[in-house]
Image (cartoon, rainbow, N blue to C red):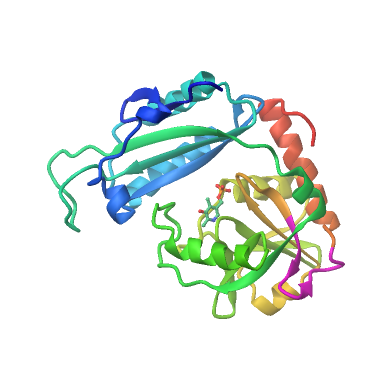
Amino acid sequence: MAVETVFLNGEFVKRSDAKVDIEDRGYQFGDGIYEVIRVYSGEVFTMDEHMERLYQSADKMKLKIPFDLQELSSIVCKLIEKNDVEEGIVYMQVSRGISPRQHHFPGGDISGSVIAYTKDFKRPSKQMNEGVTATLVEDIRWLRCDIKSLNLLGNILAKEEAASKGHFEAIQHRGETVTEGSSSNVFIVKDGSIYTHPATNLILNGITRRVIKDIAAKSGVPFVEKTFTVDELLAAEEMFIASTTSEVMPVIKVDEVNIGQGVPGPVTVKLQEMFTGRILTECKVQQV
Ligand SMILES: *Cc1c(COP(=O)(O)O)cnc(C)c1O
């Protein structure tokens, strides 16, 4: 694409013209929220769910988004059209706006800053087929992980630890309890049932997680929202992580320990097939 268009505070502008103020609270404090939304075959996947979560995150941190849900959804669609995105993502963020630096809210009618841009991104087919590896990391994040906040320092440190050791993801745990990945939810298969951390303040309730829950219900695989320990994870029959960009991603090894047979397990593969089916019906995507 020659000239990429981005959305910045009410206008579609050229990427090179999109500049952020040094006193934007998103920039100074990470005082804002975001969403990553998937585009398959030029069509948005689970748009409403992402939009609703954005507004829920905003409510939880008392942030007012200066557009309503329909307006933001149509901005996302326009951006995809303008940039001619086939396979990719839309990144959207809302910060608490621009004001002289002070910790408490600016007050008055400071409007939130909204930006959105697109990026081409192909389905990670090779990794989805072969599986990936992960490392265990203590979860040092704050206690409102249910908000998709711009404050990602804990997540970044976890992911860097994984990346520096050549792993795809960091599996975070608070003491013995597995919470989630640095940017994904974590699932194990035990006695034929899927287990994942309940959607509390300690994890981000992924949209992909919700699609998987729905798929599991339709295919008759028990989906149990109950915590499990690091030892249970290492002894699991299968393990996978899930996110908008990773979809259903098999994890075949955690640090030095093979999970199950050290290859993607049958329940995981079945979920992948059904997930692809879901994409096909929603977005008419090509098969992996
Ligand atoms: C975004 C995110 C996820 C995955 O959510 P999806 O909606 O499935 O992309 C999981 N954990 C964290 C910490 C996240 O930020």
Q: Residue at x 34, y 53 (%)?
A: 30
Quarter placement of the C terminus: top right
Look at the image and say whether residue 263 sits in the magenta stretch: no
Identity of the residue furthest to the left in this view: 108
On the question of residue 235 being in view, the answer is: no
Q: Is residue 119 above or below residue 124?
A: above
Q: Position of residue 10 (x, y in %)?
A: 31, 26
Q: Please name the residue shown 47% across and 28% down the image.
A: 76
Q: Nearer the viewer, residue 280 or 184?
A: 184
Q: Is residue 14 left or right of residue 175?
A: left
Observer able to see residue 17: yes
Q: Position of residue 53 (x, y in %)?
A: 45, 44
Tell me if residue 252 is in the magenta stretch: yes
Q: Position of residue 2 (x, y in %)?
A: 53, 21
Q: Position of residue 81 (x, y in %)?
A: 53, 19
Q: Which residues are magenta?
A: 250-262
Please tell me in which quadrant of the rendered image residue 134 appears: bottom right
| Total numbered labels | 0
Determine whether 100 is above or below 156 in the image: above
Q: Nearer the viewer, residue 101 or 52?
A: 101
